[in-house]
Amino acid sequence: MIRFEHVTKRYPDGTTAVDDLSFEVAEGELVTLVGPSGCGKTTTMKMVNRLIDPTAGTIRVDGEDIADTDPVELRRRIGYVIQQTGLFPHKTVLDNTATVPHLLGTPRKKARARAAELLDLVGLDPTVYGHRYPDQLSGGQRQRVGVARALAADPPVLLMDEPFGAVDPVIREHLQTEFRHLQRTLRKTVLFVTHDIEEAIRLGDRIAVYGHGRIEQFDTPAAVLGAPATPYVAEFVGADRGIKRLSVTPVEPGDLEERPVVRLDDPAGRAAAALAADGASWAVVLDGDATPYGWVPAAALTDGGPDGTVGDHARPMDATLPVGAPLREAFGALLGHDAGWIAVLDEGRYAGVLTPGGLHAALRRATTADTVRTTREAVVLDTVPGA
Ligand SMILES: Nc1ncnc2c1ncn2[C@@H]1O[C@H](COP(=O)(O)OP(=O)(O)OP(=O)(O)O)[C@@H](O)[C@H]1O
């Protein structure tokens, strides 16, 4: 969808900001460009909507060489969000959001109705915030308006240059999470610039790690963290990259353990006998066919005699995780609940439990995947002193 072919940008003073860059962002993909200050990220982005023209090379959007495209027509197809959101100070939030569709010919009333929907989508109640002016909003709220405004003309491509840069870390993480959810449904083609590796990992389908004017590695977050291509990338992603990988490795069905399962309305005596036959000290309790309710210790089932149902003795546990949740979330959930396990759902149905042992195995699985990715040439054999 966005394709760079041997693109170089040299500024008139001789600075080479981007040097022979080639990469592609697929349709519906979110690529983060990450690197230290001055490495050419913004220059790369501004060449896509022709705010800057390259010195050499070709950039294509949807197959078309943008050098042959009228910049105004090009920018209609490309939403642009920047850190200083660039909102019109004298217009209300609603009018700021509705401006571009209105300019493009959408009747005013329809443009405003759509703007209200978009404000809602980015988490701003239009009845509360729609009539405010930008200086009556917090930094995080202004950035949400910036995102809503960029989405208003429904462009297939979004360029985002440090869009969440000006807010504190907590709000920032919140905005990132919301944007990730939004992107799951919108599936825009997004080029997202950041100097924050955590942000790049959380948001990117793939990450381009920039050195000076060049991409040092272009791959999925898991691959960049698991197998940094160069010492520069390894240093940039940080010594704690193992921990960061918890954010990008998902829980898979194979990581789950099977436990005996009983149902709330099962007779307690029969459940106790089944557990005894299994030699199990506890069972998962389901409410109906597939909804986890909690757990029951074997010993509790026969408290007060064998009559009654499992429900009389079961203990609720409200935490569950979906298959595909990042291990970081699973780790947090395990720490937050005393039971040493967490029920995992696959498409809403109980699929098994995740234990600390399963979590460990999942991390090892991710490591093994990296070993397969790493080419033989890339492996450096060190001599172990004294071996
Ligand atoms: N108009 C210009 N004239 C000359 N040099 C420029 C110009 N704009 C940018 N540069 C230089 O080009 C290089 C890349 O700049 P760019 O803004 O693309 O980097 P960046 O990675 O986005 O940095 P930051 O994270 O600080 O925004 C830098 O060395 C910068 O000083």
Image (cartoon, rainbow, N blue to C red):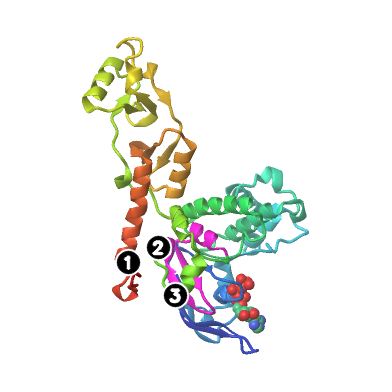
Which residue bears the numbered disc 1? 373
253 above or below 280? below
Q: Nearer the viewer, mark 3 or mark 1?
A: 1
Disc 2 to disc 3: CB gap under 8 Å: no
Q: Which quarter of the picture shows residue 151?
A: bottom right
Q: What element carries label 2?
A: helix
Residue at 52 percent of width and 69 percent of height: 33
Where on the image, by quarter, is ligand 1?
bottom right
Q: Mark 3: few, some, or many residues within 10 Å (few <14, many ≥20)? A: some
Amino acid on which disc 2 is placed: Gly
Which residue bears the numbered disc 2? 226
Closest to the observer, 173 or 2: 173
Where is residue 266? Give x, y as percent: 30, 19
Q: Mark 1: few, some, or many residues within 10 Å (few <14, many ≥20)? A: few
Q: Which residue lies furthest to the front in this view?
A: 386
Q: Mark 2: few, some, or many residues within 10 Å (few <14, many ≥20)? A: many
Which image quarter holds the N terminus?
A: bottom left
Mark 2 → mark 1, Cα distance in angstroms: 9 Å
Q: Disc number at residue 23?
A: 3
* N-terminal-most mark, 2 or 1: 2
11 above or below 368? below
Q: What stretch is highlighted in magenta?
A: 196-225
